[in-house]
Amino acid sequence: MTPYNTLADEFGLYVYLNTKMDLPSNRETILHFFDAVQKSFPQMTDFDCRDSGEFLLEEDREKGSYRWLVLEPKTVRSGYMNPPTLEEADAHHERILEIAPFHLDFNHLDCEALDVLFAFDFLYAGNHDALVAEALGLSTMEPMLHLPGAKVVNYEPSLMLALDENCRRQCRLAIETRTNAFQIRTGQFPEAPISVYFTVRQYWGRLNHQNFVESYREQRRTCQELVDEYVTPAVLRPLALAIAAK
């Protein structure tokens, strides 16, 4: 179990490889690519072709811990939900980043950016936005919460930072809530996840010397360091404590 499963109800480690040109979509190429992935991870048996043009291969979601892979016109997305260890998630992502360029016929020239993302879900039956405001605060705007009849309808703070002088490597913290005005009016709140996403993005540009697996390893290490040092104490623990107190 990763250290993050004790902080949130669910934890996922995702990778998005974004290309500049459309990826191949012919039947033979798609099937060969997914077949190669399945040979590395035989439990990925559920294949689907969606009306949107996406292709999906994943393990059984009912297990709780599962790998998935989605191919979009300009993005290869891979994920491991509730991985037993970070190392097992690394093996999944690194294998896909290793074989995708050969099967899908792209290289560093066609790469727009590589994203490594930590995702945390906190299940909560209540006003998500009010809870986030309570847990994280509103700084100078907090007095507005005390206006007569005021109710928080939307509060999804986000922050982006450049991690180098050229702004080619960036990180982004985003919180996604799932409460709507109808639920606030009626007071009926189904249990749904509050999601916290932390992404380290590398714009490819002039990185001809580095391959995708090497960049993934650096970005994943940076992502974990920033989550452990800043996101966990400032966001994850306050959210978990606020939910536990309800």
Image: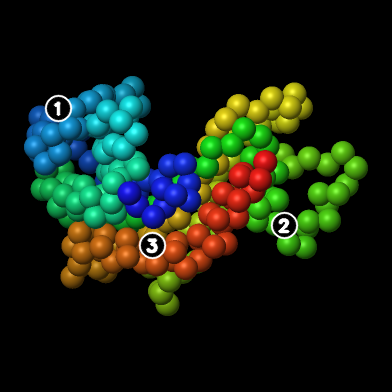
Query: SS class of the residue under badge 3?
Result: helix
> On the picture, is 143 further left or further right than 52?
right
Q: Which residue is mark 2?
A: 138
* Dot 1 or dot 2, earlier in sequence: 1
Mark 2 belongs to which amino acid?
Leu
Tag in front: 1 or 3: 3
Residue 132 drawn above or below residue 229: above
Question: How many discs mark residues in the rendered view?
Answer: 3
**Percent x, y of residue 241:** 60, 51
Front residue of 31/183: it is 183
Q: Which residue is mark 3?
A: 223
Q: Residue at x 62, y 32 (%)?
A: 125
**Percent x, y of residue 36:** 10, 38
> On the picture, is 221 further left or further right than 108?
right
Report whether residue 124 is seen: yes
- In which quadrant of the rendered view does residue 246 lie? top right
Q: Residue at x 51, y 66 (%)?
A: 230
Q: Residues within 10 Å of mark 1 (few under 14, many from 20)?
A: few
Q: Which mark is residue 27?
A: 1
Front residue of 237/47: it is 237
- In which quadrant of the rendered view does residue 178 lie? top right
